[in-house]
Image (tube, rainbow, N blue to C red):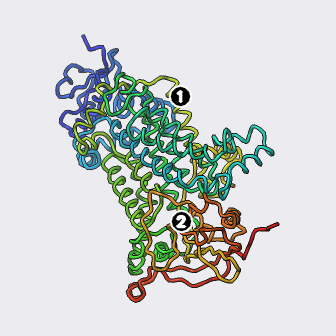
Amino acid sequence: MRDAKPLLVYDGDCGFCRFWVDYWQKLTKDQIDYAPFQEVAGNFPEIPLEQFQRSVQLIQPSGGVTSAAKAVFQVLSYVHGCGWLLWVYNYLPGFAPASERTYRFVAWHRPFFDRIQHLVWGRKLDPPSHFLTRWIFLRLLGIVYLAAFASLLPQITGLAGAHGILPIHNVLASVAQNLGPERYRLFPTLAWLNASDGFLKFLAGSGTFLSILLILGIAPGPVVLLLWVFYLSLVTAGQDFMAFQWDILLLEAGCLAIFLVPWSGLESHWKRPRSDLAARPPSKVVIWLLRWLLFRLMFLSGCVKLLSHDPTWRNLTALEYHYHTQPLPTPLAWYASQLPAWFQKCSADGVFILEIGVPFLIFTPRRVRFLGCALLVFFQILIALTGNYAFFNLLAVSLCVLLLDDQLLRRALPAGLIRRVLPPIVKAVRPTGRRAALLVLAAVILFGSGVLVMVTLFGPRSVPVPALEATDWLEPFHIVSSYGLFAVMTTSRMEIIIQGSEDGIHWSDYSFKYKPGNLSKAPGWVAPYQPRLDWQMWFAALGNYRQNPWFVNLMVRLLEGSPPVLKLLGKNPFPEAPPRYVRALAFDYRFTDFAERRASGNWWQRKVEGLYFPVAALRRP
């Protein structure tokens, strides 16, 4: 009497076949039996021996037999979450014959593909699990959130407080007068409840505390949700000062993390799960959505450089300017700028390879994917060594961690930690409602990111109007965004020097904590802290003060002597009382070379370009 389970018969002398059968056995567990035809072919005289030698045979208890690619898809239909493959085989036009032709080609060249699979997968392939991956990612995400909230805590009142540069309560009051209930979607922030300085500090302080809880693994589900809500509130409240791409990237990654964390009560990941709920594996859908986010971040950053038609990227001279024109260079940037032109061109070539070519390794088999992870992490380290980009590099590395799996991480992490993190029993079944929510999220992100990619690369005319409207509706929540760093390279560095005076004749400089000013002051190490006013001054220098209304507000606050704003600066030359007049000059800054630095001790050289902001004073009664 035949077994009541299907039987997959394969070539036991074929290493390629044994490799995949071993993997399928781990996936299907006890739902299917497996046997080499060398042992069981005599039990099925109705099947010619040549058919066993040519392809795998799936024999059903009823006696039905399927072969080759269709048999493979039927086997995979027993794997949770893979049943759609058989549906595609049966109903998608052209897929079945293409699959069978591919199967025949591989079957005729099994020794070659056996060597290839060992190269890209290793000698043994286990079903991928990501418990350790999730554990590391969430802690890194907690560190990123900690850097973001903690650096914002001492700055938020000077940026968006009642006496700050862009008071959020004024904006909300104006919006409330002109918009109805739609204002809550267009300006999603808890500051609608309370826009006081104390509440803004509460949001930043609470975010700092919650970040520590996430690092410790305490109540990760609700903590990640609150972190996203609080940071979205501050990004909205911070206006121009919170519009950087890494702020948006953190919100998108944080939103996806809400669906990645275990919502199983308040147990810590430092302890063994107290219920099988905590043993549920991380969602593969969310893992791949986060990988897709990493791909978009890197790939689009490379594409925009080419599509901008910027001549410095086209002729590979961009890095000859980058190191001294970037917002906040590090000391190593000075040395990097001294490298010869041929090296800078080779480096620019490397940027295109790392941003356009390497991201495709994200979708390759595990060993090749690990190589892509190593290259992307190496790229982020190089960026961090020469530029202060807040928490961007750490966040990008956090996303790269999701390219790894538990099988690799077991070799690198302490055994005690592995025992605490890995659950004793893996329960793969998830509630139907959760699966439905994940599928909706995936559809929104894939649709939204697809639209944004088309908009970024080809322009709005390439996208249907309803698609653009749907994307615009979601835009305030930053669930899905477009990315592209340094599309156009700035070839000169304009620095704004703000000055104050009591008599309009003798002027004293306001100094900033981190941006260039004093010629003899070396560039500093700032990241992951982000001095947001210093950064915004770099953007202001790319245009004029009329294009940056916040700069006019800054000058008014200096005339008023606003304490929260003055705390954002390095040196206040008027400690007793604010000046009567203010103005701003524009200077062209460049790095010195070795000879000039030895002679003068200066890291920078500059020449005056003219008046950036005219002399101004407050109207006094």
Q: Which residue is mark 1?
A: 436
Number of callouts in the render?
A: 2
Q: Is residue 205 above or below residue 239?
A: above
Q: Is residue 417 above or below residue 603?
A: above
User: Residue 515: horizontal and vertical position, in percent?
Assistant: 52, 69
Work out whether residue 425 or residue 610 is closer to the camera in this orientation and state it.
Answer: 610
Please say whether residue 286 is visible from this viewpoint.
yes
In the image, is 499 to the left or to the right of 517? right
Q: Is residue 35 above or below residue 528?
A: above
Give the Cα distance between marks 2 and 1: 38 Å
In the picture as drawn, the residue positioned furthest to the top comes out as 1
Tell me what residue is drawn at x 64 percent, y 49 percent. 237
Q: Quadrant of residue 444?
A: top right
In the image, is 49 to the left or to the right of 176? left
Quarter of the figure with the N terminus = top left
Q: Quadrant of residue 542?
A: bottom right
Amino acid marked by disc 2: Phe
User: Residue 322: horizontal and vertical position, in percent?
Assistant: 49, 72
In the image, is 124 to the left or to the right of 497? left
Amino acid marked by disc 1: Ala
In the image, is 508 to the left or to the right of 13? right
Q: Is residue 47 above or below residue 54?
A: above
Q: Residues within 10 Å of mark 2 (few under 14, many from 20)?
A: some
User: Residue 394: horizontal and vertical position, in percent?
Assistant: 42, 53
Mark 2 or mark 1: which comes first in sequence?
A: 1
Work out whether residue 196 or residue 38 is closer to the camera in this orientation and state it.
Answer: 196
Q: Quadrant of residue 73?
A: top left
Callout in the foreground (2, 1): 2
Work out whether residue 71 or residue 24 is closer to the camera in this orientation and state it.
Answer: 24
Q: Which residue is mark 2?
A: 486
Work out whether residue 529 or residue 503 is closer to the camera in this orientation and state it.
Answer: 503
In the picture as drawn, the residue positioned furthest to the front comes out as 576
